[in-house]
């Protein structure tokens, strides 16, 4: 198969630098949101989570080259991430409820 | 597209397995995938205790120095740039460039570790928050300490690659994969810090 004989094209150094600038800007927005929490209100939490997720996906996709790798690798890596999210969501839910019951 | 280089022949990356992915590379992805569960356990433990009332003070969120940690985060993010530039250089067989970027990544990683040591020292000496102060403090130190340990291992691998390249006058095509594997590990340590910085430093609050 043709896909087995070549890797997909990787970005150039210029694109890597552009991505680094974008990551730095996103980090700056995160820190600004932290200090503007009173002005932004409760929306600051979803905003911060979305920004972190964006940075997370950009690093994995471009710097770890996952978007240029075989889909098999993406599915495999995502499976570990999703498994961890599910397992610890259950843990947080269970112990969170137990803590509330103990306090009341 | 101007921003995309030519396709890289698979043969330059060594032997391939039936999956079409070099087996050492697949092994690294398996390891990194399992690390989500490793760090997830510590982040979850921190979240369970970070805002729980009735624990001994100070809570970690009461002593954070956000400007300082923001600079540390920036340093680690930029080390991901230098790491990917090292990988790009070795793919072009630019041995001198590879050494330069590997050394830059190791130096930035060392700066991050130095910042973490400074932060831990300040928490203990200035605020009296020790490993045994409370479950929240324990969770914080264990989580960020294990992350720091991962960075330290990465720095040692980077210096090893740099030393090998210097001693042998460059890395052979067979060793190119080592740069890619260390790069994958390094970027993973970076994405874990992206999560820690947001969840642990920016979002956690002490109880009222």
Image (tube, helix red, strand yellow):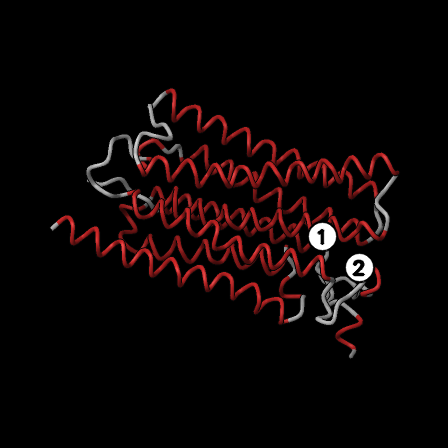
Q: Chain of mark 2?
A: B
User: The residue tagged with tag 2: helix, strand or loop?
Assistant: helix
B199 sits left or right of A18 in the view: left
Q: Position of residue B181 (x, y in %)?
A: 69, 51
Residue B79, by quadrant, is top right
Chain name for mark 1: B
- Residue on which disc 2 sits: B13
Mark 2 nearby-residue class (10 Å; few <14, some 14–19, many ≥20): many
Q: Is residue A28 left or right of residue B92?
A: left
Question: Can you tell which quarter of the image residue B132 is in?
Answer: top left
**Up-down relation of residue B167 to residue A94 (above or below):** above
Reply above or below: A46 against B193: below
Front-most of B35 and A54?
Answer: B35
In 3D space, how far apart are the residues under numbered discs 2 and 1 (Cα atoms)? Answer: 9 Å
Q: Dot 1: what SS?
A: helix
Where does label 1 land, which residue? Answer: B180
Q: Do the residues under discs 2 and 1 have CB atoms within 8 angstroms?
A: yes
Q: Residue furthest right?
A: B169
Residue occupying the point 66% across, 39% down:
B105
Q: Residue B97, percent across and down?
A: 79, 42
**Residue B158: where, in percent of width, then height?**
70, 39
Residue at point 33%, 48% (across, down): B47
């Amino acid at each position: 198969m043709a896909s087995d004989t070549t890797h997909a094209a990787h970005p150039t150094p210029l694109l890597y630098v552009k991505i680094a600038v974008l990551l730095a800007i996103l980090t700056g927005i995160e820190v600004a949101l932290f200090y503007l929490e009173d002005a932004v209100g409760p929306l600051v939490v979803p905003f911060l989570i979305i920004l972190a997720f964006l940075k997370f996906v950009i690093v994995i996709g471009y710097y770890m080259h996952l978007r240029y790798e075989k889909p098999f690798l993406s599915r495999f890596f995502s499976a570990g991430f999703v498994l961890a999210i599910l397992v610890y969501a259950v843990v947080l839910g269970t112990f969170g409820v137990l803590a509330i019951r103990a306090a009341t | 597209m101007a921003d995309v280089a030519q396709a890289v022949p698979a043969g330059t990356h060594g032997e391939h397995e039936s999956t079409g992915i070099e087996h050492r590379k697949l092994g690294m992805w398996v390891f990194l995938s399992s690390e989500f569960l490793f760090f997830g356990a510590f982040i979850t433990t921190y979240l369970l205790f970070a805002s729980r009332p009735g624990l001994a003070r100070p809570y970690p969120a009461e002593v954070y120095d956000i400007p300082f940690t923001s600079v540390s985060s920036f340093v680690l993010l930029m080390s991901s740039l230098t790491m990917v530039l090292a990988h790009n250089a070795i793919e072009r067989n630019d041995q001198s460039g590879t050494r330069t970027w590997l050394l830059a990544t190791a130096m930035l990683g060392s700066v991050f570790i130095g910042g973490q040591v400074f932060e831990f020292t300040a928490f203990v000496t200035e605020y009296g928050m020790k490993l045994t102060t409370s479950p929240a403090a324990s969770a914080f130190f264990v989580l960020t300490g294990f992350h720091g340990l991962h960075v330290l291992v990465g720095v040692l691998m980077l210096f090893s690659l740099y030393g090998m390249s210097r001693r042998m006058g460059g890395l052979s095509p067979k060793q190119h994969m080592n740069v890619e594997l260390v790069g994958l590990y390094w970027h993973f340590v970076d994405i874990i810090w992206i999560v820690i910085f947001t969840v642990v430093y920016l979002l956690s609050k002490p109880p009222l």
